[in-house]
Image (spheres, grey):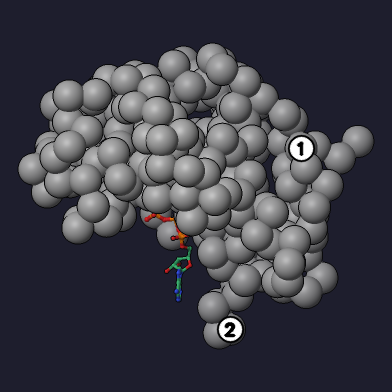
Amino acid sequence: MAGFVSIRNLRKSYGTFEALKGIDLEIEKGEVVCVVGPSGSGKSTLIRCINRLESFSDDSTILVDGTPVMPGRALAKVRAEVGMVFQGFNLFPHLTVRENVMLAPRRVRGANRATAGEQADRLLQRVGISEQADKYPDYLSGGQQQRVAIARALAMEPQVMLFDEPTSALDPEMVGEVLDVMRDLAGTGVTMVIVTHEMGFASQVADRVIFMDGGEIVEAGPPNELLGAPKHPRTRNFLSAVLNH
Ligand SMILES: Nc1ncnc2c1ncn2[C@@H]1O[C@H](COP(=O)(O)OP(=O)(O)OP(=O)(O)O)[C@@H](O)[C@H]1O
């Protein structure tokens, strides 16, 4: 049966270089999937294809809640259902924290100012930074900015949240506060796909961990199996390199 996010034969090339070599992946509604693997294995490319920030081969199919992720009118529907959080926080520097969170509901959904403002305040409370609402992003720490970015993505009430190494650009002492917000979110029924190098976090929150290497899914399974007792030698090599680092 097709998953809530259904990926079939996903191929992506940059010139002659094949970054994704035919990925098949079904993600259930509410499932939390962590994608791990070495640098350059195609993790970011995979999740960027899900909302078509990257184009992909014509013979590949991605469906989100049954809607094909293809150029055209349906793409706006998919993008409204899929929130994304990047490594860099990508907040608008000329807008306050609250205005950053209000922007998409106002522009895309036509929400009025009061409704969008109330929702922003609720979301900022949820990510623990209500007191920063009237500041500009540059005055916030990296961890706080990333929490605003999560609130901003949640403001569209997405069905799916994509996270592309959300803690990689943070100073170590700020990683925990962002992972805590994501951990809370994982308990709320939002479907999450998370590219991460945080193996401890993946083992705690993931329903399934996917190991990618060379543009392919080498192995996938529940965290205790994939991280605890990987079957494939490439997974074992990767994990021993990461964990002994
Ligand atoms: N715009 C691009 N043009 C050319 N090659 C690209 C482009 N984006 C990515 N690639 C290549 O595609 C491959 C997969 O990149 P991707 O960023 O998906 O890897 P990744 O697993 O997310 O790596 P990392 O953990 O370092 O972020 C890499 O070899 C990368 O160099």
Which residue is label 2 attached to?
A: 16
Mark carried by residue 4:
1
Image location (x, y in percent) of residue 46: 58, 55
Inter-mark Cα distance, 1 to 2: 31 Å
Task: Specify the quarter for ligand 1.
Answer: bottom left
Which residue does the image show at 60% across and 75% down from the upper left?
A: 13
Furthest-right residue in view? 1
Decide if residue 196 is in sight here.
no
Which residue does the image show at 65% across and 60% down from the upper left?
A: 76
Amino acid type, residue under disc 1 in the picture: Phe
Q: Quadrant of the N terminus?
A: top right
Identify the element where label 2 is drawn.
loop
Height in image: 41 above or below 176? below
Which residue does the image show at 75% across and 61% down from the upper left?
A: 74
Height in image: 21 above or below 226? below
Q: How many marks?
A: 2
Amino acid type, residue under disc 2 in the picture: Thr
Image location (x, y in percent) of residue 154: 48, 35
The one of 140 and 108 positioned closer to us in this rendering:
108
Labelled pair 1, 2 in contact (Cβ < 8 Å): no
Sequence-earlier tag: 1 or 2? 1
